[in-house]
Image (spheres, rainbow, N blue to C red):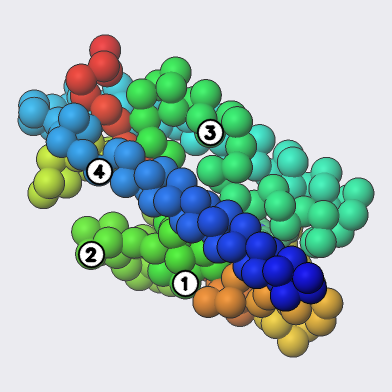
Amino acid sequence: MKNTFQLIAVIVMTVMLTSCSFLGKNRINESDDSTWKWSGTLTQDVAATHKSTGRTVLKASFLTLTGKLSSAMVEGGVQQAMKYCNLQAYPLTDSLSKTYHVSIKRLAAKTRNPANAMGPFEKEIFDTYDRLNAQKESIMDQVVLTKDNYLEYYAPIILTNQCLSCHGNPDSDIKAEDLALINSLYPADMATGFKPGDLRGMWRIRFMPARQK
Ligand code: HEC
């Protein structure tokens, strides 16, 4: 009897885990198909309009994310705030995507969630931001047309004091029990050891041309 229960539990877990990773996959690839390809050229006009849309979307996402994060930190510390760190978990991300016909991602070189890893083109943009930031040059948001014909808006994400309890030095900034939780949820975590002012990642907002007006 006990074995049967164990077997059922294993089956249920497996189904849940597979369907989750399927969902994850769909999400990640949803903007990678050809309907998202941009057929025009990147004129100054196109760049200016999309920079302004990019900034609007970013502001809304950023405000929700940091707002939820800091109130959860006050209420229940890192353990409570952790669940607000996944951008895709917000209904707002979904509704912004629909309103502006965009896909919104946060990308990083040292990721916590491997789903936020960068491709070679994105890494080039990141490396340039990182080099300029290390030289204390100012780094700006930008609109680019990729080699694969995706129209995208990028903006750097700089680490602040507010981020240290989850992304700072694992020996001094992050509490041992919080580090244990992070490691158990994200076994491939690389996103610690940052200092305020470091480039932590970047926003990528991809525009869908077919419905964009
Ligand atoms: C309460 C802990 C916590 C705090 C505070 C926190 N983060 Fe995170 N951060 C996470 C977790 C957990 C993830 C993984 C989310 C996911 O599953 O996509 C993450 C992911 C990210 C990512 C996406 C790339 C990746 O590594 O997966 C960026 C960028 C990021 N955080 C930046 C920041 C910045 C900037 C701050 C400060 C304003 C901050 N975080 C504060 C826990 C935190």
Q: Amino acid at mark 3?
A: Thr
Helix, strand or loop under label 4: loop
Q: Which residue is mark 3?
A: 93
Crowding at label 1, few (<14), some or many (≥20) Cα neighbours within 10 Å? some
The Cα atoms of the two marked residues, 3 and 4, are separated by 17 Å
Identify the residue at horizontal 69%, vertical 48% (top origin).
84
Q: Residue at x 83, y 44 (%)?
A: 71
Of marks 3 and 2, which one's residue comes earlier in the chain?
Answer: 3
Q: Residue at x 35, y 70 (%)?
A: 131
Task: Please give left or right for residue 137 compared with residue 120 in the image.
Answer: right
> Label 1: which residue?
110
Q: Depth check: 118 or 58 in front?
A: 118
Residue in front for this viewpoint, 113 or 19:
19
**Could you give the CA–CA distance between mark 2 and mark 4, rounded to whole angstroms?**
15 Å
Residue matched to label 2: 120
Q: Nearer the viewer, mark 2 or mark 4?
A: 4
Q: Position of residue 163 (x, y in %)?
A: 68, 61
The quadrant of the picture occupied by the C terminus is top left
